[in-house]
Amino acid sequence: MTDNYLYKVFINNAYDRYCEQQPKVSRNEECLINIIKGFSIPAGLPWHLVDKVYIPINYGDEFHWVLAVVVLKERRIRVYDSMSRSKHSELSFEIQKLAKILPTYLDMSGFLDQKIRTDLSTIEAYRDKMANPFDVQYIERIAQQIIGSLNCGPFVASYVEYLSDGLQVRNGRLNAGLLRKKCAALLWKYGEVKAQKLYATDVKDPR
């Protein structure tokens, strides 16, 4: 038998920090679950009614954006990176976090209990694998930005446009200047329509 006072101190400190942060953790969990249930997005569609979910992800300290596409029926995350040719092949920490935490919140939200379109619990990709992280696939041979150009945002928007139209992201060069102008024009038009319909917040979608 041994007595370790420092162990108790560490336990107390850890407990205090967790309790202090618990309200914030609970709010974050509620937001994540509400998104999966379709309560917190303008389209109002819960995840069990769609095949794919598009998630722009920032790589934190790298000041770089990529597109993660969650393919729900395959239990897979496809990553579209406009600088993939200049990077190593290891999995980024941000993608690892997403792949690991998704199963937890899909379970907490009752995602697998929904059987309106597909009974996901019967799909091989989910069978006895709920505790496992999602598979991750980095998509190769796609349009790349010039290194140092800081054009990852327009490239992510372009990837989303291609994929949502049912097209494959091409391997050719994209004109970053035109992409920026296009995004600016779309946002301007969106703002005008929203103003005309007297929407005062971002909750409503003027479509």
Image (cartoon, rainbow, N blue to C red):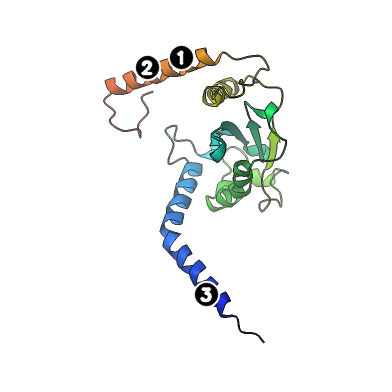
- The secondary element bearing badge 3 is classed as helix
Q: To which residue does mark 1 refer? A: 181
- Of the pair 113 and 97, the residue shown nearer to us: 97
Closer to us: mark 1 or mark 2? 1
Q: To which residue does mark 3 refer? A: 9
State the quadrant of the C terminus: top left
Q: Amino acid at mark 3?
A: Val
How crowded pointer 1 is (Cα within 10 Å; few <14, some 14-19, many 20+) is rated as few
Q: Could you give the CA–CA distance between mark 1 and mark 2, rounded to whole angstroms? A: 12 Å
Residue 108 image point, x, y percent: 54, 53
CB within 8 Å, label 1 to label 2: no
Closer to us: mark 3 or mark 2? 3
Q: Is residue 59 visible?
A: no
Q: To which residue does mark 2 refer? A: 189
Q: Amino acid at mark 2?
A: Lys
Q: Amino acid at mark 1?
A: Lys
Q: Could you give the CA–CA distance between mark 3 and mark 2, rounded to whole angstroms? A: 58 Å
First reached walking from the N terminus: tag 1 or tag 2: 1
- Establish if 80 lies above or below 28: above
Q: Could you give the CA–CA distance between mark 1 and mark 3, rounded to whole angstroms? A: 57 Å
Residue at 59% across, 49% down: 101
Residue 61 image point, x, y percent: 55, 40
Residue at 59% across, 15% down: 174
Q: Quadrant of residue 194?
A: top left
